[in-house]
Image (tube, coloured by chain):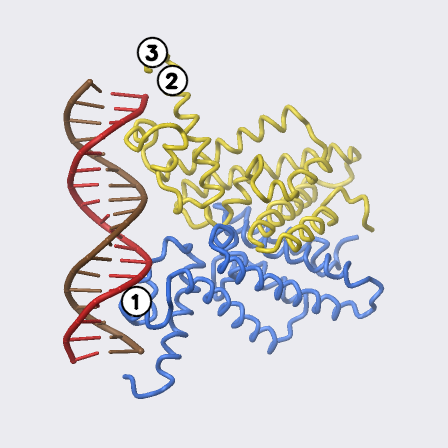
Chain colours: A yellow, B blue, C brown, D red
DNA sequence: GTCTATAATTAGATAGAC
DNA sequence: GTCTATCTAATTATAGAC
């Protein structure tokens, strides 16, 4: 089992993927190392060969989820409208197939130590910058300063992350669907059906 | 100590207030019953004379915070601009003096049992309806249907709750301040400095 | 209604065999 | 690098005195 030099790297990756999914869906405190390791196909004892603590796993899992999604988006190059359509969907709210750590762990990460908050903050920065680039691509004529473009990107980020996080907290599927629709129709959206 | 019939009610209220503040700031799992009871001026053993479980305390604490804030708003009758100004402030982000359970517990509540999610959902409904009434007061000319007014209220609610929750998660005070400003300047705000 | 004492369970982290 | 076994600490919840 330990013949290949890629073995440890592969195990580490499996742990990160399992942790990202479990933490996002259930919250950091409600998931034990045991549960993470079993989902990764190992037992408790092997954990500390890969990570120093559960807390370190948390921050690395957030970064890993962000990187995975960034790679996907870099390949697909979706438009702003496409991004909103899939991000603000009931499927995403229900956690399939991807869970955005920014929305799923928003108040969870806020209550952790600096290491975790830094990972969350840097992920948010990347998300906001991606939106800014995508929006400037949709509207190539640049009449606004960078400052205003960055404000607009942050407003869109809030509408996306906040909308998804609220829809997830809501206990009522009909209301959640209405909320997601309202967010997609907001001025921060493609802006095509409002004046 | 047990002479007054209001004694139990007062203790219960103190527990609810302590729980609301502690849960909001640190998250449900990171606060023990011991900590809550000490903040309320009692010891662990007295807890179960007031609540059946920690989980029940959670949902009741959310409702108690919402009711307390609703009473305050009913007395003050602030305008939409005033509400945005105080809700989307750095003071509120830092938890002083009031913590909105919708923002502070957004992903925390989403991961709990139905009882807690129901309390959160009903609080959100009340918040959204309050915004709708306040917005219709600011713009007395009603050209829109109820459905559109409700959509606009939900968009504003997302910008407020989402903006505050993100600002709280961010590890960078400068970025958090910029984000709150962007939210206040958004079309969901008073709408006075955008077109 | 509040207290002290305790039961019962669980989790994060470590030790040492292989 | 992964396993089993264990340590230590914390937690929810209960029992019974006052």
In the image, are marks 2 and 1 on the same chain? no
In this picture, residue D18 sits left or right of residue B137: left
Q: Identify the mark at residue A7; answer none if there is no mark.
A: 2
Q: Residue B161, image x and y in percent?
A: 59, 56
Asked which secondary structure carries label 3, the reply is loop
In this picture, residue B86 sits left or right of residue D9: right
In this rendering, is residue A80 above or below A77? below
Front in this rendered view, residue D14 or A162: D14
Q: Chain of mark 3?
A: A
Tell me the crowding category of disc 1: few under 14, some 14 to 19, or many 20 or more residues within 10 angstroms, Cα based: few
Q: Chain of mark 2?
A: A
Tell me the crowding category of disc 3: few under 14, some 14 to 19, or many 20 or more residues within 10 angstroms, Cα based: few
Asked which secondary structure carries label 1, the reply is helix
Q: Residue B32, image x and y in percent?
A: 33, 58
Q: Residue at x 67, y 50 (%)?
A: A177
Q: Residue B38, image x and y in percent?
A: 30, 67
Q: Chain of mark 1?
A: B
Asked which secondary structure carries label 2, the reply is helix
């Amino acid at each position: 089992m330990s013949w290949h030099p890629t073995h440890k790297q592969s195990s580490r990756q499996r742990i990160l993927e399992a942790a990202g999914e479990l933490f996002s869906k259930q919250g950091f405190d409600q998931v034990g190392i045991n549960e993470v390791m079993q989902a990764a196909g190992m037992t408790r004892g092997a954990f500390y060969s890969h990570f120093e603590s559960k807390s370190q796993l948390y921050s690395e899992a957030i970064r890993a989820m962000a990187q995975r999604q960034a790679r996907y988006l870099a390949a697909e190059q979706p438009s702003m409208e496409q991004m909103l359509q899939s991000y603000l969907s009931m499927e995403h709210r229900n956690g399939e197939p991807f869970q955005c750590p920014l929305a799923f762990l928003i108040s969870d990460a806020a209550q952790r130590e600096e290491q975790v908050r830094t990972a969350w903050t840097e992920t948010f920065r990347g998300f906001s910058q991606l939106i800014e680039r995508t929006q400037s691509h949709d509207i190539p004529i640049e009449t606004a300063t960078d400052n205003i473009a960055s404000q607009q990107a942050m407003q869109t980020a809030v509408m996306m992350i906040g909308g998804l996080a609220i829809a997830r907290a809501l206990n009522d599927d009909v209301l959640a669907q209405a909320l997601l629709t309202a967010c997609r129709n907001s001025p921060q959206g493609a802006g095509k059906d409002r004046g």
